[in-house]
Each structure stands twice: as structure tokens, then as C-alpha cells.
Image (spheres, helix red, strand yellow):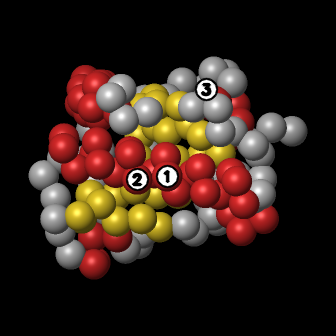
């Protein structure tokens, strides 16, 4: 059975898509720690991040760097933090979260809620900046 993220990649489940290439897909997290909190996932369905083939792992990091750069241009923050946890969905993924301090990347913090229009605006702004990077 395909993972939730595979179903998103295939268009079966809607998302606030930011960008994709041959290996990776990125979209806004719907239970974000901050505005602009995004996920980067491999198109290959692998549960454990460290079981990804080296070329896919390298591509995910390079792709994440571009997404993080676009996030930082849109969302005022000190840095874009990165986390690989992999417990929520059995499909490898990277969280990219705009942060001002280390505790902003604490996944036990309350999640933020945005309107449909806010998600769409944020995704469009990040995506617009990614078109020149990807």
C-alpha cells in the first residue's frame, strides 16, 4: 500500500506543493511549527532516511538547500532548521522549519494553524523563488 507521501506525489491527496524534480518533491507541512514549515521527500518510497541510495540522499540534501533558501526569502527567520525524524509517516522526509532559536525546532511545541488562503499564499511565494533555483 502506498504511503501517504507517495499518494501526495501521485496527486491522490492534495498538498501545497512548492517544487519537484526527478528525485524529490516538496510541500508545506499541514501541521507546521512555523509559517513556511516544509517537507522534502524522495519520490522513491523508502521508510528509513538512511536506507536511501546515496545519490537520492545527496539529491535530497541539495534540493533541501534550495527550498530552505526560498523559505528564508519569504519567511523572516534567523535560519531554516532541518530535522529528520521519520516517525510520523513511513516515508523518508526532511523537515525544513524557519527558526529564531533552537527550541523553535521542538516537535512537542504547539502546531500553528493557517487559513487556506495563507497556505496558498505562502506556497506560491516560496514556489516563485524556487523557479530560478530548481
- Please tell me whether residue 51 is drawn above or below residue 124 in the rendered image: below
Give the quadrant of the C terminus: top left
Q: Earlier in the sequence, mark 2 or mark 3?
A: 3
For label 1, the crowd category at 10 Å Cα-Cα, with few meaning under 14, some 14 to 19 and many 20 or more, is few
Residue 24 location, quadrant: top right
Which residue is painted at 61% across and 26% down in the image?
13
Describe the element under mark 1 as helix, strand or loop: helix
C-alpha distance separating marks 1 and 3: 26 Å
Q: Tell me the number on the disc at residue 62.
A: 1
Question: Residue 43 placed where, x, y %?
Answer: 69, 39
Instruction: Specify whether residue 33 is in view.
Output: no
Give the quadrant of the N terminus: top right
Q: Tell me the number on the disc at residue 65.
A: 2
C-alpha distance separating marks 2 and 1: 5 Å
Which residue is painted at 63% across and 21% down in the image?
11
Describe the element under mark 3 as helix, strand or loop: loop
Q: Check contact, mark 2 vs mark 1: CB within 8 A.
A: yes
Q: Name the residue under label 3.
A: 13
Describe the element under mark 2 as helix, strand or loop: helix
Amino acid at each position: 500500500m502506498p504511503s501517504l507521501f507517495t499518494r501526495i506525489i501521485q496527486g491522490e491527496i492534495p498538498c501545497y506543493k512548492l517544487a519537484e524534480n526527478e528525485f524529490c518533491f516538496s510541500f508545506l507541512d499541514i501541521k507546521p511549527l512555523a509559517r513556511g514549515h516544509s517537507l522534502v521527500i524522495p519520490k522513491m518510497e523508502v521508510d528509513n532516511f538512511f536506507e536511501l541510495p546515496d545519490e537520492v540522499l545527496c539529491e535530497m540534501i541539495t534540493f533541501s538547500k534550495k527550498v530552505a533558501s526560498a523559505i528564508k526569502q519569504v519567511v523572516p527567520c534567523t535560519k531554516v532548521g532541518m530535522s529528520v525524524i521519520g516517525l510520523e509517516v513511513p516515508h523518508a522526509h526532511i523537515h525544513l522549519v524557519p527558526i529564531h532559536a533552537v527550541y523553535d525546532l521542538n516537535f512537542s511545541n504547539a502546531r500553528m494553524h493557517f487559513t487556506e488562503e495563507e497556505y496558498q499564499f505562502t506556497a506560491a511565494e516560496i514556489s516563485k523563488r524556487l523557479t530560478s533555483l530548481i
